[in-house]
Image (tube, rainbow, N blue to C red):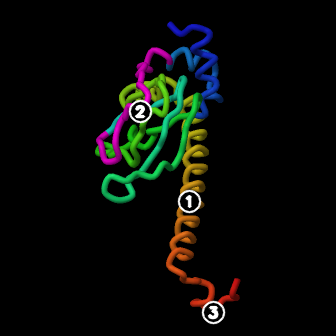
Amino acid sequence: MAKPADIAFLHQVDLLRDLEESQLAALWPRLRERRLRKSEVLFREGDPGEEMFFIRSGVILVSKKVSGRVEQILNRFESGASFGEMSVFGDEAKRTATIQAEIETSLLALDRESLNQFIEANPRDAARFFQEMARVLIRRLLQSSQLVAEVTRWGLEATGLDAERRSGGPAT
């Protein structure tokens, strides 16, 4: 049974804020709590997955392997954020990044089967959920595109290449 504090937290989650209190109460029993110690890895890039997570407290670091054992931190998520959404939709979904707790962290996990049950029981609320998920994923895609552009610029500067001069554009 969800307590008022549990429902209040779910209203803070980016993907759930548009759902009604009764639907959050219906979703609550489908969530499983996971606790991570400081620096504990939840999963690594390439691992199979079928759960998404909501951060109840703490901080999560998102990183990708750059080369060998070197990883680049791409993002830092705090309470109310969600991650792992892609893994609940693909049958052979592989994790696209490594997730690690920066500090002691409490998560709520929603697995594929529980999400499907929620969709079947609450199609209108599921539509709101997916609309917000699309917004979150678009925002992350834009952030990734900006990062790619920045890394490309760094690479060009590091090698001494000037893309605009080579293409006949104005020199800067």
Q: Position of residue 155 (x, y in %)?
A: 51, 72
The question of residue 125 being in magenta is answered with no
The amino acid marked with disc number 1 is: Leu
Q: CA distance from mark 1 to mark 3?
A: 25 Å
Which residue is located at x 52 percent, y 34 percent? 82
Q: Amino acid at mark 3?
A: Gly
For discs 1 and 2, the disc positioned in front in the rendered view: 2
Q: Please tell me whether mark 3 sits on a helix, a strand or a loop.
A: loop
Residue that label 3 marks: 168
Q: Residue furthest bottom?
A: 168
**Spot occupied by residue 162 in the image (x, y as percentages of width and height):** 58, 83
Question: In the image, what residue occupies the spot 48% across and 25% down?
Answer: 105
Which x, y percent locates residue 84? Answer: 44, 39
Labelled disc at residue 147: 1
Quadrant in the picture for the C terminus: bottom right
User: Of marks 1 and 2, which one's residue comes earlier in the chain?
Assistant: 2
Alpha carbon of mark 1 to alpha carbon of mark 2: how far? 24 Å
Q: Please tell me the numbered disc located at residue 66.
A: none
Circles 1 and 2: CB atoms closer than 8 Å? no
Judging by the rendered image, the residue that carries numbered circle 2 is 39
Mark closest to the chain's N terminus, 1 or 3: 1
Is residue 39 found inside the magenta-colored segment of the image? yes
Say what secondary structure mark 2 lies in.
Answer: loop
The span picked out in magenta is 28-48
**Tag 1's secondary structure?**
helix
